[in-house]
Image (spheres, rainbow, N blue to C red):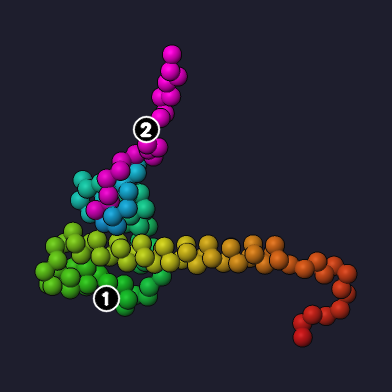
């Protein structure tokens, strides 16, 4: 008798949908409904970006107005559909958030490296401020 391994030849699959997000192209996973039309499935990251308006919170009023113009008039006057213009704005929000997360991760990694490489100077009672 040959032992049967039920996992042999079976790919490891993450739960949720493997379809790409129509905004960012990443895996949908457990999708959210886009606030654009309440029908289109998007990844949860893009859904969060649509919902929180993160980019709008870090811009001043004139910058927000310029982005609103770009989305509602500027991009559509260049031939983009309203959906495509919406995707550009959400991609900008995602880029800003991903950049922030990347910088935070790098900072924590640098702190951890400093902590691991720190010389034990408990014996020193002088002033190191110079």
In this picture, residue 1 sits left or right of residue 128: left
Q: Quadrant of residue 91?
A: bottom left
In this picture, residue 24 sits left or right of residue 37: right
Callout 2 environment at 10 Å: few (<14), some (14 to 19), or many (20+)? few
As helix, strand or loop, the secondary structure at mark 2 comes to loop
Q: Residue at x 43, y 18 (%)?
A: 2
Question: Within the magenta stretch, is there residue 10?
Answer: yes
Which numbered marker is on residue 66? 1
Q: Quadrant of residue 112?
A: bottom right
As helix, strand or loop, the secondary structure at mark 1 comes to helix
Q: Is residue 32 visible?
A: no
Q: Is there CB contact under 8 Å for labels 2 and 1? A: no
Q: Is label 2 or label 1 in front?
A: 2
**Nearest to the observer: residue 103 or residue 90:** 103
Q: Is 30 placed above or below 75 here?
A: above
Q: Residue at x 22, y 72 (%)?
A: 70
Question: Within the magenta stretch, is there residue 64?
Answer: no
Our reading of the magenta stretch's main secondary structure is: loop
Q: Is 21 placed above or below 54 here?
A: above
Q: Which residues are magenta?
A: 1-22
In this picture, residue 95 sits left or right of residue 66: right
């Amino acid at each position: 008798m040959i032992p049967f391994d039920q996992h042999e030849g079976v790919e490891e699959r993450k739960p949720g949908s493997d379809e790409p997000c129509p905004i960012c192209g990443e895996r949908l996973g457990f999708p959210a409904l886009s606030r654009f039309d309440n029908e289109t499935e998007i990844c949860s990251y893009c859904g969060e970006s649509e919902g929180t308006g993160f980019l709008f919170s870090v811009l001043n009023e004139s910058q927000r107005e310029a982005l609103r113009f770009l989305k509602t008039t500027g991009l559509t006057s260049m031939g983009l559909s309203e959906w495509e213009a919406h995707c550009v704005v959400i991609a900008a929000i995602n880029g800003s958030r991903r950049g922030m997360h990347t910088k935070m991760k790098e900072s924590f990694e640098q702190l951890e490296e400093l902590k691991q490489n720190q010389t034990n100077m408990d014996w020193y009672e002088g002033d190191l401020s110079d």
